[in-house]
C-alpha cells in the first residue's frame, strides 16, 4: 500500500543547455543535451520515493518508446506505476527544456498523452488507501474528482498547480486542498499584490510560496513562517520545485511542523538545482547531511 499518491503530468524531457536564452529572432548555442523522464507528478513521486516514502503515481503516457523509458525509470526509482495509463495511438508528452548558464529554464511542449485520465477513470479505492494526495497540473475536472475522493476519505491533499494556473479553472480542486504550493508568479495570480490576502479558493488553506533562491514562506491560520533558502550555485532549476514540494510533504506528514518542513523543502530544492536534469532530487540522508553542514 502506498502512503502518498501523486497525480498529474508524466513527461519525456529533452533538456538543452544553452549559453543564453535567445531573444525573439535570436539564436543560442547548445552546449549539451539530455533525455530523461519528467513531469511534475512523476518528478514529485520519484523525489518522495528517494525519501523512503511509499509513493504511487496516477497519470498517462503513450504506447511508444518514450512511454516505455518513462515507466522503466519510475519503476527503478521504486514508484508504483500500476495507475499510469498507457494510451494507444498518442505519443508520450515531450517537453523541451531550454536551460541557460544561470540555471533558468524555458519550456516548450506538445500535449501528447498527458491528460488521458478522466474523472470517470479515477480509481477511488486506490486513492482512499493512501494517507496523502499530491496534485500537480492536469485536467481541472480530474484534479477536482481526485481531491474530492481523497478529502471524503480523510486524506490530506496538497496541490502544486504550476505554470498554467492562470489559464485553467482549478477552483474546485483548490477548495479541497489543505496545502497549496505556488511560486511568486503563480501567487500573484491568486493573491493580492502584497501576498497577504488569499482569494476565496485559498481561504483557510496552508499556502506555501516559493521564492526560488531567496527561500520560501508558509502562511497558515496560526501564523506565517519564512526561510531564507541556501546560498548554493544553481546549475538547473528544472524539477527543483517538485523536489521542494516532496520534501515539504514528506517532513510534514511525519512531524506536522511547518517550520521544519519548510527548511527541509528548501534544502531539497537547493540540492536539486545543483545538478542538471529534472530527476536529481536528493535522498533523505543527503538532505540531513546538507542541513548539518549549515550549522
Image (cartoon, grey):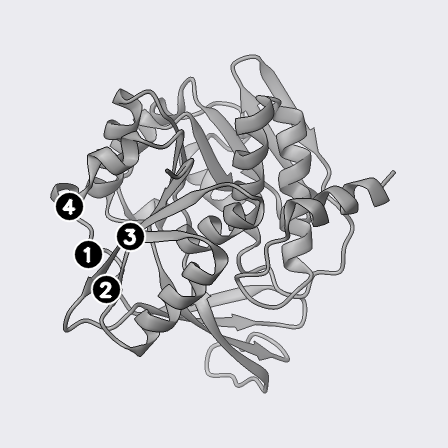
The reply to whether residue 148 is visible in this rendering is yes
Q: Are marks 4 and 1 in contact (CB under 8 Å)?
A: yes
SS type, badge 1: loop
Q: Earlier in the sequence, mark 2 or mark 3?
A: 3
Q: Are marks 3 and 4 in contact (CB under 8 Å)?
A: no
Q: Is residue 220 left or right of residue 103?
A: left
Q: CA distance from mark 4 to mark 1?
A: 9 Å
What residue would you read off at disc 1? Answer: 116
Q: Earlier in the sequence, mark 4 or mark 2?
A: 2
SS type, badge 4: helix
Q: Is residue 97 above or below residue 143?
A: below
What residue would you read off at disc 2? Answer: 113
Q: Earlier in the sequence, mark 4 or mark 1?
A: 1
Q: Nearer the viewer, residue 7 or 22?
A: 7
- In the rendered image, residue 124, in percent from the top left (x then y), is placed at 21, 35
What residue would you read off at disc 3? Answer: 82
SS type, badge 3: strand
Q: CA distance from mark 3 to mark 1?
A: 15 Å
Q: Earlier in the sequence, mark 3 or mark 4?
A: 3
| Nearest to viewer (mark 3 / mark 4) | 3
Q: CA distance from mark 2 to mark 3?
A: 17 Å
What residue would you read off at disc 4? Answer: 121
Question: Of all residues shown, which one is farthest toward the front?
Answer: 1
| Nearest to viewer (mark 2 / mark 3) | 3
Q: CA distance from mark 3 to mark 4?
A: 13 Å
Q: Which quadrant of the view contains residue 3? A: top left
Q: Is residue 260 above or below residue 63?
A: above
In the image, what residue occupies the spot 66% across and 26% down? 259
Q: Are marks 2 and 3 in contact (CB under 8 Å)?
A: no
Amino acid at each position: 500500500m502506498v502512503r502518498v499518491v501523486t497525480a498529474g503530468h508524466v513527461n519525456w524531457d529533452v533538456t538543452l543547455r544553452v549559453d543564453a536564452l535567445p531573444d525573439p529572432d535570436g539564436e543560442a548555442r547548445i552546449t549539451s543535451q539530455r533525455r530523461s523522464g519528467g513531469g511534475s507528478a512523476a518528478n514529485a513521486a520519484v523525489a518522495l520515493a528517494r525519501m523512503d516514502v511509499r509513493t504511487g503515481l496516477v497519470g498517462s503516457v503513450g504506447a511508444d518508446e518514450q512511454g516505455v523509458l518513462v515507466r522503466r525509470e519510475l519503476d527503478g526509482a521504486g514508484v508504483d506505476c500500476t495507475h499510469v495509463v498507457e494510451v494507444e495511438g498518442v505519443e508520450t508528452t515531450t517537453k523541451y527544456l531550454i536551460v541557460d548558464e544561470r540555471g533558468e529554464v524555458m519550456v516548450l511542449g506538445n500535449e501528447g498523452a498527458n491528460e488521458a485520465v478522466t474523472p470517470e477513470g479515477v480509481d477511488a479505492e486506490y486513492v482512499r488507501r493512501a494517507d496523502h494526495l499530491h496534485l500537480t497540473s492536469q485536467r481541472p475536472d480530474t484534479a477536482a474528482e481526485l481531491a474530492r475522493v481523497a478529502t471524503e476519505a480523510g486524506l490530506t491533499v496538497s496541490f502544486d498547480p504550476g505554470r498554467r494556473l492562470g489559464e485553467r479553472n482549478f477552483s474546485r480542486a483548490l477548495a479541497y486542498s489543505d496545502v497549496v504550493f505556488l511560486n511568486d508568479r503563480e501567487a500573484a495570480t491568486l493573491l493580492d499584490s502584497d501576498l497577504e490576502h488569499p482569494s476565496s479558493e485559498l481561504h483557510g488553506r496552508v499556502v506555501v510560496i516559493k521564492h526560488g533562491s531567496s527561500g520560501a514562506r508558509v502562511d497558515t491560520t496560526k501564523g506565517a513562517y519564512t526561510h531564507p533558502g541556501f546560498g548554493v550555485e544553481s546549475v538547473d532549476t528544472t524539477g527543483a520545485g517538485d523536489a521542494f514540494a516532496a520534501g515539504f510533504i514528506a517532513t510534514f506528514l511525519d512531524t506536522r511542523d511547518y517550520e521544519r518542513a519548510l527548511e527541509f523543502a528548501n534544502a531539497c530544492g537547493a540540492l536539486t538545482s545543483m545538478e542538471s536534469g529534472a530527476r536529481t532530487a536528493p535522498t533523505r540522508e543527503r538532505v540531513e547531511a546538507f542541513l548539518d553542514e549549515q550549522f
